[in-house]
Image: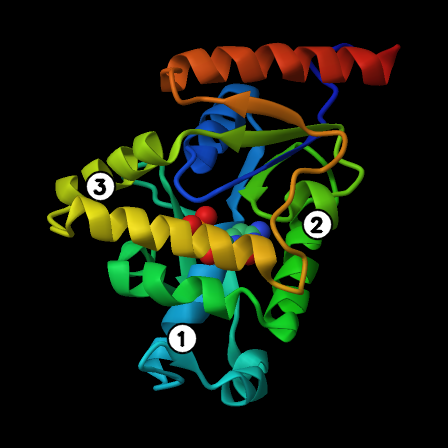
Amino acid sequence: MSEEKKKITIAIDGYSSCGKSTLAKALAHTLQYVFVDSGAMYRCICLFALRNGFVSNGMVDKQALIERLPEITLSFHKNPETGDQAILLNNEDVSMLIRSFEISQSVSQIATIKEVRQKLVHQQQLLGQKGGIVMDGRDIGTVVFPHAELKLFLTASIEVRTQRRFDEMFNKGQEVAFETVKQNLLERDRIDSTREESPLRQAEDAIVIDNSNLTPDGQLKQALELVKEAIHQQLA
Ligand code: DC
C-alpha cells in the first residue's frame, strides 16, 4: 500500500486549552481523516446533567445521572453551511451550548464518573474501528486507542493557555476575568490528572509537543512530519 493511502489512528492528549482540538481538526482536514473531539462528548453529558438538575452548588448527583445515561445518544454531523463538525445530544445540535463557562466549571467532575467514561470510551472506540481518525482528549493514547500508531501529548505554559482560552471566550462575547479563567484551567487540570478513572497522563510512547511558542501552522507542520514517519514505520 502506498504511504498516501495508509490510514493510521492518531491520538492527541494534553491539558486543558493546549490547542489539542485545533491541531486534531487541522490534521484531519489535511489528511482527510475523521476528527473527534472527545471532550465535546463529556461536555454533552454535563449539559444533560445541568438541564436535569443533577448539578447544584458544584456537586453532581452521580447516581441520578448514571440511571439516566441510557437515554443519552450522541452523534456527529457536518454542518453543510460552515463545514464544521456539529455534536448532537439526543438529535439536538448543542455545539455552541457546550462551550459555556458554566459547562467548563462542572465538566471535569462529570468526567470522573466511571459509568460515563465507559459509555463514551465504547462509542469512541467504535468510531475509530476503521482507523483514519484523529481523536483528542485526555485518555486517548492510554485507554481509548492504546495501540494508536501515533500518539501526541501537547503542552503549553499556563499563561499561554489562559490567554488563548480568555481570547476565545472574549471573542464569543463571554467576559470572564483572566484570573478566573486561569484558576478554572488549573482546577480542571488538577481534577483530570488526579481522578481514579483513567487520569490524564502522558502515554509512554507519546511524543511531546510544547506549543507555547508555536503558531497553529507551525504545530501542524511538525505533526504532519510525525504522521509521515509513523506511516513510514508501519509500511517498513
Ligand atoms: O477538552 P475539553 O476541555 O473540552 O474537555 C472537557 C472535560 O472532559 C475536561 O475536564 C476533561 C474531560 N475529558 C476527559 O476526561 N477525557 C477525554 N477523553 C476528554 C475530555
Disc 1 target residue:
48
Say left or right for 4 vs 107. right
Q: Gap in Å between the C-alphas at discs 1 and 2? A: 23 Å
Which comes sooner in the sequence, label 3 or label 1? 1
Quarter of the image with the C terminus in it: top right
Percent coordinates x, y for residue 83 in the rendering: 35, 36
Q: Nearer the viewer, residue 58 or 55?
A: 58
Which comes sooner in the sequence, label 1 or label 2? 1
Indicate if the residue with disc 1 has its beta carbon within 8 Å of ligand 1: no
Say left or right for 122 vs 80. right
Residue 157 in view of the camera: yes
**Residue drawn 82% across and 14% down?**
233
* In this view, 33 is above or below 71: above
Percent coordinates x, y for residue 81 in the rendering: 27, 39
Q: Gap in Å between the C-alphas at discs 3 and 1? A: 25 Å
In which image quadrant can residue 78 be found? top left
In which image quadrant can residue 178 be found? top left
Residue 40 in view of the camera: no
Count neighbours of disc 1 (C-alpha within 10 A) and say few if under 14, some if 14 to 19, many if 20 or more: many
Percent coordinates x, y for residue 202 in the rendering: 66, 38
Quarter of the image with the N terminus in it: top right
**Residue drawn 40% across and 30% down?**
157
**SS of the residue under disc 1:** helix
Colour treatment of the image: rainbow
The amino acid type of the residue labelled 2 equals Val
**SS of the residue under disc 2:** helix
Disc 2 target residue:
144
Disc 3 target residue:
166
- Name the mark on residue 175: none
Q: Gap in Å between the C-alphas at discs 3 and 2? A: 30 Å
Which comes sooner in the sequence, label 3 or label 2? 2
**Residue drawn 59% across and 72% down?**
113
